């Protein structure tokens, strides 16, 4: 068992046992990536700079235990696209990362325009661990000001870094393609998602 605290005296000789008890067994090792992890001993902890997270060794594998951002609410600037970038005012875009779970929500007030026949996508604040086609990770609403219309949507994970929107009114595909509509100034895209990293 590691010893965590010791009052040292002037001139005291540090022994190998002292180093093992007070340093090796209680230190968090900083690594640039998984390639730098030491040979694990059960209970050992490392900090991975590439993942921005702490990992613990279970005796057989390194598993993420705490992200650096813990449960603090963070902000990000989502990128809105429909064939190309669509300018929008970020009314709100926040996320909380707790362990390997990210919860994010956003409200984007469209000031530019998109191209109909193309899917509307939004970038995520943190890269997802993987993706499956059509995986539903949240919900939202697209408000069309000119038509005074709102469409409830299911948020779909498209890639590890973007989501698109499936209209709940059709099974044909992503909003912007089915129905074939383009975002316009005055519209709004609102959503909330939950996914793993």
Image: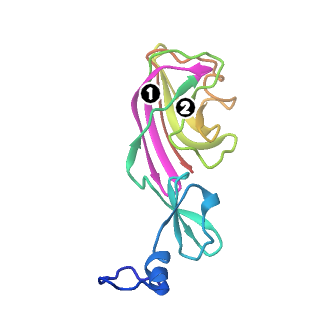
The scheme the figure's colours follow is rainbow
Let me know if residue 44 is in the magenta part. no
Q: What residue is shown at x 59% (from left), y 73% (from top)?
A: 58
Let me know if residue 86 is in the magenta part. yes
Q: What residue is shown at x 67% (from left), y 40% (from top)?
A: 134
Q: Can residue 140 be seen in this view?
A: yes
Q: Is mark 2 on a helix, strand or loop?
A: strand
Q: Say whether marks 2 and 1 touch (CB < 8 Å).
A: yes
Towards the viewer: 78 or 32: 32
The circle on residue 122 is 2
First in sequence, mark 2 or 1: give its number: 1
In magenta, the rendered stretch is 82-108
User: Where is residue 66 drawn, in percent x and y?
Assistant: 48, 60
- Residue 189 against residue 8 in the figure, above or below: above
Q: Is residue 167 visible?
A: no
User: Where is residue 113 drawn, in percent x and y?
Assistant: 52, 15
Towards the viewer: 132 or 151: 132
- Residue 26 against residue 188 in the figure, above or below: below
Q: What residue is shown at x 54% (from left), y 31% (from top)?
A: 122
Q: Is mark 1 on a helix, strand or loop?
A: strand
């Amino acid at each position: 068992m590691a010893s965590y605290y010791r009052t040292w005296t002037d001139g005291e000789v540090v022994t190998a046992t002292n180093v093992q008890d007070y340093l090796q067994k209680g230190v968090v090792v900083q690594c640039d990536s998984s390639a730098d992890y030491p040979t694990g001993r059960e209970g050992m902890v490392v900090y991975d700079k590439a993942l921005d997270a702490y990992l613990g060794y279970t005796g057989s594998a390194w598993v993420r235990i705490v992200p650096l951002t813990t449960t603090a609410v963070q902000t990000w600037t989502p990128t809105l696209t429909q064939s190309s970038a669509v300018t929008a005012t970020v009314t709100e875009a926040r996320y909380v990362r707790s362990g390997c779970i990210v919860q994010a929500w956003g409200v984007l007030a469209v000031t530019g325009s998109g191209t109909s026949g193309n899917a509307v996508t939004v970038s995520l604040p943190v890269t997802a661990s993987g993706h499956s086609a059509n995986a539903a990770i949240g919900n939202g609403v697209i408000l069309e000001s000119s038509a005074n219309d709102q469409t409830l949507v299911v948020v779909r994970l498209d890639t590890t870094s973007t989501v698109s929107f499936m209209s709940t009114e059709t099974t044909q595909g992503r909003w912007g393609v089915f129905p074939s509509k383009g975002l316009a100034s005055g519209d709004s895209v609102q959503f909330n998602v939950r996914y793993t990293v």
